[in-house]
Image: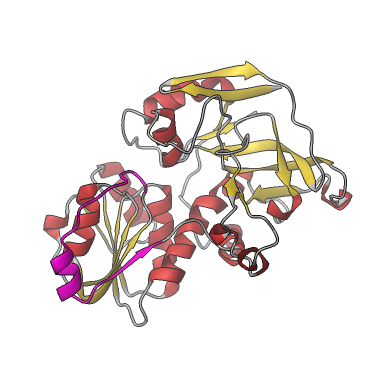
Amino acid sequence: MKALVWHGPNRMSVDEVSEPRPAAGEVLVLTEAAGICGSEVEGYLGRMANRKPPLVMGHEFAGRVIEAGEGADRAWIGKRVAINPIVGCGRCRYCAAGDRNLCPDRYLIGVAAPGGFASTAAVPERCLFELPQGMDARLGALVEPLANGVHAIRQGAPQGAATAVVIGAGTIGLGCMQAALLHGIETVVMLERHPVRRDHALRLGAHGAYETGDQLKPGVDLVIDAAGTDSTRQLAIDLLAPAGTAVFIGLHSDQTPLSWHRVIRGNHTIRGVFGYSDDDFRKALDWLAAGRAGIGELGAVLPLEQGPAAFATLAEGPTDEIKVFLGA
């Protein structure tokens, strides 16, 4: 079968590889649409130590179940599904509660195991979420990034928050923005350098969209940093009201200095969020299916052969297109 294989920094090709076989408790999913995540672009550039070449990435994907391994329910065969790529152990108290993102032994499909940038992918049955009849596979691929936003707001929004700023209008940032609006926060503003993406945020419901934090006054109840750079993390702190909350979801930088006197004297809360619970994933799926959230017009699903060029273009910086989809 065909697979888009990352071979190391800036090296990617479409190769013929052996089709995976579903192990016990797994199914085989035929990929219909897989979105390229910003973290995968960082991985393509060699900036993510958790990705080791050769690797088939792709953790935002949806498709159709075509085979069931031993012990997996054969009723899944033929069903169209979105994939929760976080695989927990299935035994710990976190997994039992549906919080597989907290499992100490978790791994991600597309990071530690071959993902959706291939004709087919082997997926544990417990990672399947059935798509409603007729739902576009591209929307199914958007469940994963939106679930990050659902989780960020559910975990991070302080009670009674009236104002929020989201830094970074990529897919996850837009998901955070829409989750904040649906959470009932009165005023939600986006910060984004790219002008087309600022306009996109406004079309999706943001109450304002600005190029820099200089255009905003401090005093914000909640700031979500979906970029994850040194400067955006410090900006998140600078914008907070007393007792405000900064939620860090962006992963661009690792070690970041912050103004800790400001944090302490401001009584600020800093919250890191990663992934999502099963409930968050389900809510994201329901919102997308109902048209309550999304990214607007969806781009065409590109063949895998265009994957290397797509990654090379995205590595140069943000583009006008919010999400690039690949498919077999």
Q: For the point 74% across and 42% down, which residue is it?
A: 64
Q: Residue furthest bottom?
A: 160
- Percent of width and height locating residue 66: 81, 39
Residue 257 against residue 302 in the figure, above or below: below
| Quadrant in the picture for the N terminus | top right
The total number of labels drawn is 0
Which quarter of the picture shows residue 215?
bottom left
Q: How is the image coloured?
A: secondary structure
> Residue 66, can we see it?
yes
Q: For the point 64% across and 70% down, which residue is it?
A: 97
- Percent of width and height locating residue 238: 16, 63
Which quarter of the picture shows residue 269?
bottom left
Q: Is residue 215 left or right of residue 281?
A: left
Residue 123 against residue 273 in the figure, above or below: above
Q: Nearer the viewer, residue 89 or 227?
A: 89
Is residue 252 inside the magenta stretch?
yes
- Percent of width and height locating residue 247: 34, 63
Is residue 96 inside the magenta stretch?
no
> Residue 287, can we see it?
no
Q: Is residue 307 left or right of residue 132?
A: left
- Percent of width and height locating residue 144: 54, 51
Magenta-tinted stretch: 251-272
Q: Is residue 303 left or right of residue 193?
A: right
| Quadrant in the picture for the C terminus | top right
